């Protein structure tokens, strides 16, 4: 894509330099700022620290109008307002920690059109007096920070976020700019549906960490695999994420036995021991932390040279965050994730047996399948990972992951993919994989009969694979981007433009041999 240009963007760049003292835009910022300046609604997904705030701050200054920023955290608001004021930008925050005097001053500034940025907590925005005030102040844009808070099944769900769309309507539907660092396809869909009156331009930028080598491999002799990996990097600082407290201590002992300095870290350790271990890791070189996922939040050690997962991470988002703790200094760092069928079975059972609602369980299952699809991907792992985050600009294999380096043994899965995709198409792209697998293997389930799908040409056309293998094939199809699956509703599958190419016989489909075979063996056991 060509670099966006225009007088507005030039002025924004000048403001970036003169007001904030930064030489130029960070990657992605220019596209987004140009779109915001053009008056369109925007959803921007960028990792933490990428510089999302600038995407609404610059337009406010360039246009000289009012941007209302909805932000869930008072501390965050305070920081941003203080920073803006230091740079000479008229900014203020309305929240529960504001004194009446201050609130009065803010009101006067608003009415006089002096404020460029007003930060409000979502619950404050909904108050009748706030809405009245804003209606008079002429809001040009509502910027919604941490927009993933709107997602019902997310970790940060804030019910007040669901109301923002309604408040915007009462303010005459100003431009909406939503920003978040966490948005898989499901969350993006929820944000778009819940916040915007019209479809926004969606930008996903900056998730690639090119200095990280990515690798995922099935567990064999787990302890040996970890020892070999760490011994080959002796003297470097690293983290081994474990699946239990017990494992952190066992592995630390095993590594010590091999002459490597290793310390365990988990929430069950005595507080003093825990912080002593953490301090040692931060201050000294060459310590390996064997830790549960409790370790790492807010830890900023730039020279972590590797991150190992001794079991399947919780989700792709968790995987991304955890490997992201390596190589913050930008120098090469290694990651390795070891996963096993036992992890997958355990995770499925945990979801089934949890207290969550059926709908939420459904979402959790979809997230798990997406993670397994990433583990089993037959194409460049980085391309597959970035595609999960919606960053699909560049599909060139990276040359810096295990799949690019070692390849995977593949078979020609073109016919299998065509069968699966045509089962989706012929059933109206409205069904989940259990139903589709039944159609393919010719199983007359109640639903199959009820919808008349036993009359389709595809019914029973895929008997060469077991149902478990078809599910593995669906994951391959997902990893290759030939079809997509609805993460929120009933798990319906639909065919992408790439998938249409396959159906038309214009491209072939390599699939991971081991994965599809293993799915058959799992059934045989
Ligand atoms: P995010 O909201 O994406 O986590 P922030 O908006 O807080 O990130 O920005 C992170 C830091 O990067 C801030 O200190 C910000 O001032 C700085 N920053 C933003 N844009 C640029 C830029 N173009 N050049 C250099 N620094 C920038
Ligand atoms: Zn690659």
Image (cartoon, grey):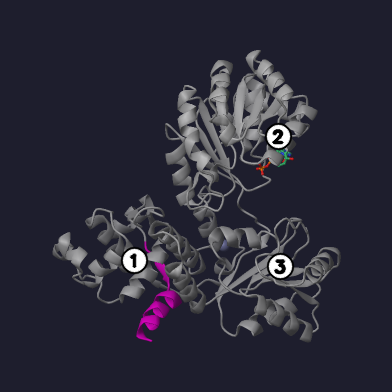
Looking at the image, tell me whether mark 3 or mark 2 is earlier in sequence order. Answer: 2
Q: Which mark is residue 306?
A: 3
Please provide the residue range marked out in magenta: 508-525
- Mark 3: secondary structure: strand
Q: Which mark is residue 195?
A: none
Near-viewer residue (453 or 419)? 453
Quadrant position of the N terminus in the picture: top right
Q: Which mark is residue 97?
A: 2
Q: Residue at x 32, y 64 (%)?
A: 433
Tell me residue 275's x, y (percent): 80, 66
- Outermost residue, top direction? 112
Quadrant position of the C terminus in the picture: bottom left
Looking at the image, tell me whether mark 2 or mark 1 is earlier in sequence order. Answer: 2
Q: Mark 3 to mark 2: distance in Å?
A: 42 Å
- Residue 302: which quarter of the image? bottom right
Q: Name the side, left or right, on which 501 lies relative to 243.
A: left
Looking at the image, tell me whether mark 3 or mark 1 is earlier in sequence order. Answer: 3
């Amino acid at each position: 894509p060509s670099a966006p240009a225009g007088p507005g963007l030039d002025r924004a760049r000048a403001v970036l330099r003169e007001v904030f003292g930064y030489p130029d835009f960070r990657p992605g910022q220019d596209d987004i700022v140009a779109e915001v300046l053009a008056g369109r609604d925007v959803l921007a997904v960028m990792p933490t620290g990428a510089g999302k705030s600038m995407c609404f701050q610059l337009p406010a200054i360039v246009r000289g109008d009012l941007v209302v920023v909805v932000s869930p955290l008072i501390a965050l608001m305070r920081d941003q307002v203080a920073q803006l004021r230091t740079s000479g930008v008229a900014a203020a925050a309305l929240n529960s920690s504001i004194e009446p005097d201050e609130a009065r001053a803010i009101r006067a500034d608003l009415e006089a059109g002096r404020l460029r940025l007003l930060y409000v907590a979502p619950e404050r925005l909904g108050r009748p007096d706030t809405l009245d005030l804003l209606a008079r102040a002429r809001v040009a844009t509502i910027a919604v920070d941490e927009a993933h808070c709107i997602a019902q099944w997310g970790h940060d769900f804030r019910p007040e976020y669901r109301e923002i769309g309604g408040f915007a309507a009462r303010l005459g539907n100003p431009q909406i700019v939503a920003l978040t660092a966490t948005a898989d396809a499901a969350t993006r869909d929820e944000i778009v549906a819940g916040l915007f009156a019209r479809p926004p331009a969606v930008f996903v930028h900056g998730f690639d960490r090119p200095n990280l080598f990515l690798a995922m491999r099935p567990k064999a002799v787990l302890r040996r695999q970890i020892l070999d990996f760490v011994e080959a990097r002796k003297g470097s600082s690293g983290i081994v994420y474990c699946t239990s407290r017990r494992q952190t201590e066992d592995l630390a002992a095993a590594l010590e036995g091999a002459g490597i300095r290793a310390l365990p870290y988990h929430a069950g350790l005595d507080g003093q021991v825990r912080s002593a271990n953490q301090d040692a890791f931060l201050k000294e070189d060459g310590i390996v932390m064997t830790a549960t996922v409790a370790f790492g939040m807010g830890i900023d050690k730039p020279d972590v040279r590797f991150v190992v997962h001794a079991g399947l991470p919780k989700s792709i988002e968790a995987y991304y965050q955890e490997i992201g703790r390596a190589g913050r200094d930008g120098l090469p760092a290694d990651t390795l994730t070891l996963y096993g069928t036992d992890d997958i079975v355990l995770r499925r059972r945990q979801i089934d047996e949890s207290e969550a609602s059926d709908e939420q369980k459904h979402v959790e299952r979809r997230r798990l399948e997406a993670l397994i699809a990433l583990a089993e991907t037959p194409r460049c792992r980085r391309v597959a990972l970035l595609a999960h985050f919606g960053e699909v600009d560049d599909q060139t294999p990276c040359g810096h992951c295990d799949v690019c380096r070692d390849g995977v043994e593949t078979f020609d899965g073109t016919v299998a993919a065509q069968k699966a995709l045509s089962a989706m198409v012929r059933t109206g792209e409205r069904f989940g994989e259990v139903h589709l697998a039944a159609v393919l293997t010719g199983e007359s389930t109640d639903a199959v009969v009820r919808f008349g799908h036993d009359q389709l040409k595809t019914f029973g056309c895929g008997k060469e694979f077991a149902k478990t293998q078809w599910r593995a094939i669906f994951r391959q199809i997902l990893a290759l981007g030939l079809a997509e699956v609805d993460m929120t509703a009933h798990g319906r599958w639909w065919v992408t433009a790439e998938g249409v190419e396959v159906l038309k016989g214009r491209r072939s489909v390599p699939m991971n041999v081991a994965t599809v075979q293993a799915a058959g063996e799992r059934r045989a056991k």
